[in-house]
Amino acid sequence: MMTNLFSVFDPSAIFGLSMNWMSTFLGLLMIPSIYWLMPSRYNIFWNTILSTLHKEFKTLLGPSGHNGSTFIFISLFSLILFNNFMGLFPYIFTSTSHLTLTLSLALPLWLSFMIYGWINHTQHMFAHLVPQGTPAILMPFMVCIETISNVIRPGTLAVRLTANMIAGHLLLTLLGNTGPSMSYMLVTFLLMAQIALLVLESAVAMIQSYVFAVLSTLYSSEVN
């Protein structure tokens, strides 16, 4: 019996309740524990990553990055990275492959940036709708284009992360489903392909979490 290929992304229900979404918050229990233990290579490596991100986000934000505003984006990066990696393990729900989570992260951030910018920097927000050096005849069109590009930002943030997570998991599922019907030699090559794809998905998990956090930082810096 053929099953829907996208059924691997469906959260399973226990007693009528979907408990898979609880995996999203496992990082709240696991990640803080590294600060309670003695220093180790893992602690030093993770703290180095956080320190590097803090310096980069502070540079992107400008003067506003000196008052601790970078930590919200570092926390966002850590949350997405943890959930992306959790989804690579067997029988663990990938919450970042659903727009329910990604849009819930992107939309409130974008709305808060827009509300803050239009209330506190109204002239700057109006000026941002028309790039410098735009001919007068093109200004009405540029306002429409800039407005549309600004409105779709939370959607592009959410869809980019979701699409990348879905694509990799679909490839792994397709390769896994074709294994039982293949010969021994072909299964060996299939296993090697799955290992290579898993390494690639690990890189995608890191890159996409970084891209999401950096773009959110850039959107924040535009309203200041």
Image: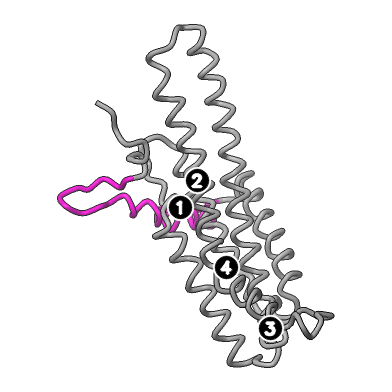
Front residue of 146/16: it is 146
* Mark 1: amino acid: Thr
Disc 3 to disc 1, C-alpha distance: 38 Å
Q: Cβ–Cβ below 8 Å for labels 3 and 2?
A: no
Q: Cβ–Cβ below 8 Å for labels 2 and 1?
A: yes
| Pair 4/1: label in front | 4
| Pair 3/2: label in front | 3
* Mark 3: amino acid: Pro
Mark with earlier residue (4, 1) = 1
Residue carrying label 1:
96
Disc 4 to disc 2, C-alpha distance: 19 Å
Q: Is residue 15 left or right of residue 203?
A: left
Disc 3 to disc 2, C-alpha distance: 38 Å
**Above or below — where is 16 with respect to 201?**
below
Disc 2 to disc 1, C-alpha distance: 7 Å
Q: Which residues are drawn in magenta?
A: 10-37
Mark with earlier residue (3, 2) = 3
Residue 50 covered by magenta stretch: no
The secondary structure type at the circle numbered 3 is helix
Query: Is the C terminus in the top left, top right, bottom left or bottom right quadrant?
Result: bottom right
Mark with earlier residue (2, 1) = 1
Q: Is residue 223 left or right of residue 15?
A: right
Residue carrying label 4:
153
Residue 165: image tag: 2
Residue carrying label 3:
140
Disc 4 to disc 1, C-alpha distance: 17 Å
Q: Residue at x 38, y 15 (%)?
A: 180
Q: Residue at x 77, y 79 (%)?
A: 131
* Mark 4: amino acid: Arg
